[in-house]
Amino acid sequence: MPLRQDKNYWTGLVYFILFILTIPAMNWVVMNVGTFCPKDGPCLIPVWPGVMAPSGVLMAGFALVLRDGLQAKLGVKWSLYAILIGAALSAFFSEPSLVLASVMAFFFSELADLIVYTPMRKKWPAWAIMASGLVGSVVDSAIFLSLAFGSIEFITGQVLGKFWMSLAVAVLIGYLHRKNKQMNINHA
């Protein structure tokens, strides 16, 4: 079957596009959407009782999961292209005060996510998403918060918010993976 007609190709392209689009969306959300938006700071959302995080945290968690899906469908090469394009878009669409923080955090967190996810993805797909999401989240949060706001005050909330997103998707993928295995066993 030609690549262009392959279901994985088209699903991978959707992941590719959504992954890249999360970057400008994340940068807009962090400065414009939240339950509390202090002047000259990130808008905040609660991620646990008494724990706040910059609102872009959910988009960042979504981006980490989309990158894993992109790699699963189209491979590492496509993931690297998307990381580079996403970093460029981040620089282009970010507010000037966020450009360096956004580009550096995105680039290094996505590379960390890729490095952790790659060796685990075939044998333990759900765990690969969890582990790579956690590593990517810590790298992203530390770099972004320190460069953008000069403080890692919200790092706990950042990591926790991204963890919730990774956990939700990992549970879904784990369920679908087991269901797919059962269907293959039943049809064998």
Image (cartoon, helix red, strand yellow):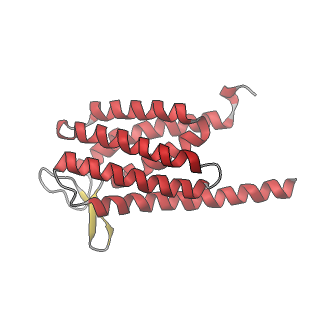
Give percent across and percent down for residue 77: 53, 31
| Image position of 73 (left or right of 79) | right
Seen in the picture, residue 20 relative to 138 is either above or below; the reply is above
Give percent across and percent down for residue 170: 54, 58
| Image position of 27 (left or right of 121) | left
Question: Quarter of the image containing the N terminus?
Answer: top right
Residue at left offset 45%, top offset 40%: 19
Q: Residue furthest left?
A: 39
Residue at left offset 38%, top offset 34%: 86
**Could you tell me how many numbered marks the image carries?**
0
Seen in the picture, residue 170 relative to 6 is either above or below; the reply is below
Residue at left offset 16%, top offset 50%: 150
Residue at left offset 31%, top offset 74%: 49
Give percent across and percent down for residue 152: 22, 57
Res 41 seen here: yes
| Image position of 175 (left or right of 46) | right
Q: Quadrant of residue 179?
A: bottom right
Q: Nearer the viewer, residue 13 or 67?
A: 67
Seen in the picture, residue 180 relative to 16 is either above or below; the reply is below
Give percent across and percent down for residue 91: 28, 32
Q: Quadrant of residue 58?
A: bottom left
Q: Residue furthest bottom?
A: 49
Q: Nearer the viewer, residue 93 or 82?
A: 82
Res 32 seen here: no
